Image (spheres, grey):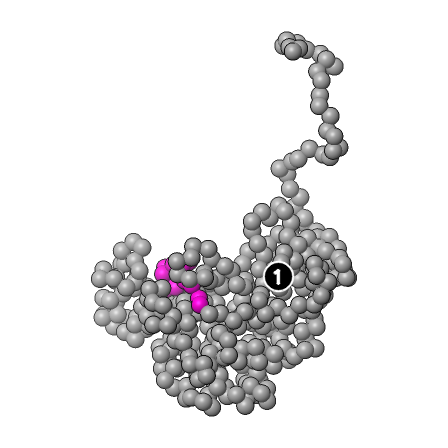
Amino acid sequence: MRRYGKHTDEDDIRTRPNRRGNRPRTNIRPKHEDAAEGMVLTVDRGRLTCLVDGRTVMAMKARELGRKAAVVGDRVALVGDLSGQKDTLARIVRIEERSSVLRRTADDDDPYERVVVANADQLAIVTALADPEPRPRLIDRCLVAAYDGGLEPLLVLTKSDLAPPEKLLELYGDLDIPYVVTSREELETGDAADRVREHLDGKVTAFVGHSGVGKTTLVNALVPEDRRRLTGHVNAVTGRGRHTTTSALALPLWEADGWVVDTPGVRSFGLAHIDPSRVIHAFPDLEPGTEGCPRACSHDEPDCALDAWVAEGHADPARLYSLRRLLSTRERREGD
């Protein structure tokens, strides 16, 4: 074995050639200052359909983003082929900071949280008054997720011809949540869509609801087929079109300035990721009373300062009851 001293001639040192002929790796990443801005419309098996300058562009996530995933509603920066032509592919190089995030877990014991939609202004919770029966626990969980993620809630109650809405609305009266009550006939004639559209103008609204409540019918009325073509795209993997019933899809609102995000039907809404200190922000009349709370207070324990705050007349006791009922949904199953 040949050994070299301290003063070796560089010509005497053997170097192993780079057989691949590629450049050495570097930690310096390009800034992509000339990247185009876009919005993620849907995600399908690693391919993301984005809206860029009024046209749909198929893209994939850049490797440098690591595990950070883009979701529907994300504002992203793209480079590459942005023509939107068939068989072209752009690259997402940056995900901009999110203004809101709707998240859920499979159940309350699941540590893995799933981001449903980003940058939505509003969460429309669609539930039927009968057939199927309303599930207040699921509504409560959706409300907690909305408050935690920074979204304003909207209740959309369908099938009022089968049952009156007053009993269900009474549960949420103290929360001052806007609502729309519709019937099956209004869903079929489109009158329901007109009334709901008034609450959607100028906003990005995510729709959630379980099977049979009329969510799909309502979304179809809000976004007719001619508007859906703006977001249609052939799958780059299978070569076929795909109706995304298993993933969220952002659609431009018809006859108004806004977006509808259609999400898959939910059977459960886990809240393992919820922090009570964030939910309290949705109750500005109660939030000042938490200054005397012990550290990591759940706002539903003997030492909670909110009891004294409300007893002194600073807030309505019904509001404190509503807050605690929502927070307790983590300990209650949806069927209870």
10 Å crowding of disc 1: few (<14), some (14-19), many (20+): many
- Residue 184 lies left or right of residue 224; in this view the side is left
At x 58% / y 87%, what residue is drawn?
188
| Secondary structure, magenta segment, majority class | loop
Q: Quadrant of the C terminus?
A: bottom left
The x, y position of residue 147, in whole percent, is 43, 66
Q: Which residues are magenta?
A: 268-280
The x, y position of residue 216, in whole percent, is 57, 77
The x, y position of residue 49, in whole percent, is 66, 62
Q: Is residue 131 visible?
A: yes
At x 59% / y 70%, what residue is drawn?
245
Q: Residue 232 sits in which quadrant? A: bottom right
Query: Against 121, is 176 above or below?
Result: below
- Residue 109 lies left or right of residue 292; in this view the side is right
Query: Against 335, is 100 above or below?
Result: above
Q: Residue 75 sits in which quadrant? A: bottom right
Mark 1 lies on a secondary structure that is: strand
At x 54% / y 69%, what residue is drawn?
264
Q: Residue 178 sits in which quadrant? A: bottom left
At x 57% / y 67%, what residue is drawn?
246
User: Pointer 1: what residue?
Assistant: 43
Q: Quadrant of the N terminus?
A: top right
